[in-house]
Image (cartoon, rainbow, N blue to C red):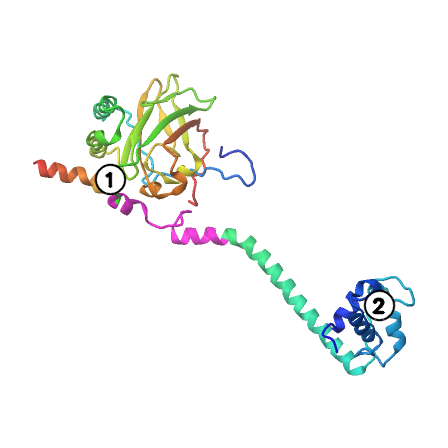
């Protein structure tokens, strides 16, 4: 679509990701978290809202193993999950 | 004296009209009178008026012919008005020069705008986006719009020369605008040589693509896969909450995210979108 040389048609402009690219997980260090997340998705009919805890854990795994830049979880959209966790504790 | 008599109009409008066009007899008489009256720039010649009325049976666009055939000579014989006409002509030329210069200046400015904008983007570091610094603050503060569920389907493609097995690990995922979501692709290198790939993405429908923001993914950077290696490639994204307020997006319930992997050649850098 973006390579069609049509003058005047709007073409799709891909944008670079905000925080860049994930380094590849060559050693599968976070594979277990990923499997938990995928299982959760399959069980919940692929609804993302119900599996946000697992996705948060996956990203935390990545951050702990230097596979992702350290970011406070609020900036990744998990602010509500952090409050819930601290309330439960 | 009737209000119809205007010098300029007289030349163009009445020139060549026949008597039949002239309406009621009273007004016709007025008009004939106008022709017979001496013009303001002539010394009073009734013959001129008769000539204009058409009794001499000349063809109609005579005044225009006369102006075209003769070289540019002042149209009047009166010395005062001749000076005035010269003055007007000079002023016209000046105005014309200014207008032409402005037109050329505008054309030049439009050509200069491209490198200038690029310079501006480099100095302010905006990198092609019109709004500076909207991403991370926005994610922190955005509120999911829970009543608008959108299905995001995933598609994976590979260029013919790249021998990877590249596929999404879920066919679809249901998200709401304002909520961050994680999705996985899997890539395997079945060959015995390390292969470097680089990918780009596409979002369908096109208008929804502007609301699709990726926080982090695996595109636009070279990814190296060792022989027989299989990796999970995550995409962390969200759909802008303003998606729910866009009237054009009312009927959009399905967004398709499509990734395509290409083989990265040695020393070839993919032009990253933006002005980096």
Within 10 Å of disc 1 (Cα), the crowding (few <14, some 14-19, many 20+) is: many
Q: With A70 as the anchor, is B215 left or right in this view?
A: right
- Which one is nearer the viewer's eye here, A23 or B9? B9
Q: Position of residue B168 (x, y in %)?
A: 34, 23
**The C terminus of chain B is located in which quarter?**
top left
- Range of residues picked out in magenta: B116-141
Q: With B74 as the anchor, is B270 left or right in this view?
A: left
> Where is B20 relative to B221, above or below?
below
- Which one is nearer the viewer's eye here, B19 or B185? B19
Q: Position of residue B33 (x, y in %)?
A: 82, 75
Extreme-left residue of the structure: A89
Q: Position of residue A34 (x, y in %)?
A: 24, 25
Q: Position of residue A69 (x, y in %)?
A: 26, 38
Q: Does the residue at mark 2 contact the one at mark 1 (Cβ under 8 Å)?
A: no
- Which one is nearer the viewer's eye here, B74 or B167? B74
Q: Marks 2 and 1: same chain?
A: no
Within 10 Å of disc 2 (Cα), the crowding (few <14, some 14-19, many 20+) is: few
Dominant secondary-structure state across the stretch colored magenta = helix
Q: With A29 as the anchor, is B206 left or right in this view?
A: right
Quadrant in the rendering for residue B178 = top left
Quadrant in the rendering for residue B192 = top left
Check disc 1 and report its element: helix, strand or loop.
loop
Residue placed under numbered mark 1 in the picture: A77
**The N terminus of chain B is located in which quarter?**
bottom right
> Where is A48 relative to B12, above or below?
above
> Where is B249 relative to B80, above or below?
above
Residue placed under numbered mark 2 in the picture: B71
Q: Is residue A8 magenta?
A: no
Check disc 2 and report its element: helix, strand or loop.
loop
Q: Residue B115 shows which numbered tag?
A: none
């Amino acid at each position: 679509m973006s390579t069609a040389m049509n003058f005047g048609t709007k073409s799709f402009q891909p944008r670079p990701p905000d925080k860049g690219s994930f380094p590849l997980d060559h050693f599968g260090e976070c594979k277990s978290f990923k499997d938990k997340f995928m299982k959760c998705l399959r069980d919940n009919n692929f609804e993302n809202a119900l599996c946000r805890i697992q996705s948060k854990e996956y990203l935390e795994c990545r951050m702990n193993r230097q596979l992702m830049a350290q970011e406070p979880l609020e900036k990744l959209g998990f602010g509500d999950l952090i409050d819930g966790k601290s309330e439960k504790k | 004296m009737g209000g119809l008599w205007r010098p300029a109009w007289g030349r163009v409008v009445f020139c060549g009209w026949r008597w039949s066009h002239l309406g009621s007899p009273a007004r016709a008489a007025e008009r004939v009178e106008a022709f017979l009256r001496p013009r303001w720039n002539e010394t009073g010649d009734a013959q001129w008026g008769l000539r204009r009325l058409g009794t001499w049976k000349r063809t109609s666009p005579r005044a225009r012919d006369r102006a075209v055939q003769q070289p540019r000579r002042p149209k009047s014989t009166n010395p005062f008005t001749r000076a005035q006409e010269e003055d007007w002509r000079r002023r016209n030329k000046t105005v014309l020069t200014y207008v032409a210069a402005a037109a050329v200046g505008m054309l030049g400015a439009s050509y200069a705008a491209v490198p200038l904008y690029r310079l501006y983007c480099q100095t302010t570091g905006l990198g092609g986006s019109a709004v500076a610094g909207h991403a991370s603050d926005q994610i922190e503060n955005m509120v999911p719009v829970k009543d608008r569920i959108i299905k995001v389907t995933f598609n994976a493609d590979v260029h013919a020369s790249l021998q990877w097995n590249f596929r999404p690990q879920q066919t679809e995922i249901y998200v709401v605008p304002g909520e961050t979501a994680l999705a996985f692709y899997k890539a395997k290198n079945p060959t015995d040589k390390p292969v470097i790939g680089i990918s780009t993405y596409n979002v369908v429908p096109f208008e929804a693509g502007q609301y699709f923001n990726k926080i982090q993914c695996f595109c636009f950077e070279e990814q190296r896969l060792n022989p027989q290696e299989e990796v999970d490639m995550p995409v962390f994204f969200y759909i802008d909450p303003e998606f729910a307020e866009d009237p054009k997006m009312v009927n959009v319930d399905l967004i398709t995210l499509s990734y395509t992997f290409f083989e990265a050649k040695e020393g070839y850098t993919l032009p990253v979108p933006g002005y980096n």
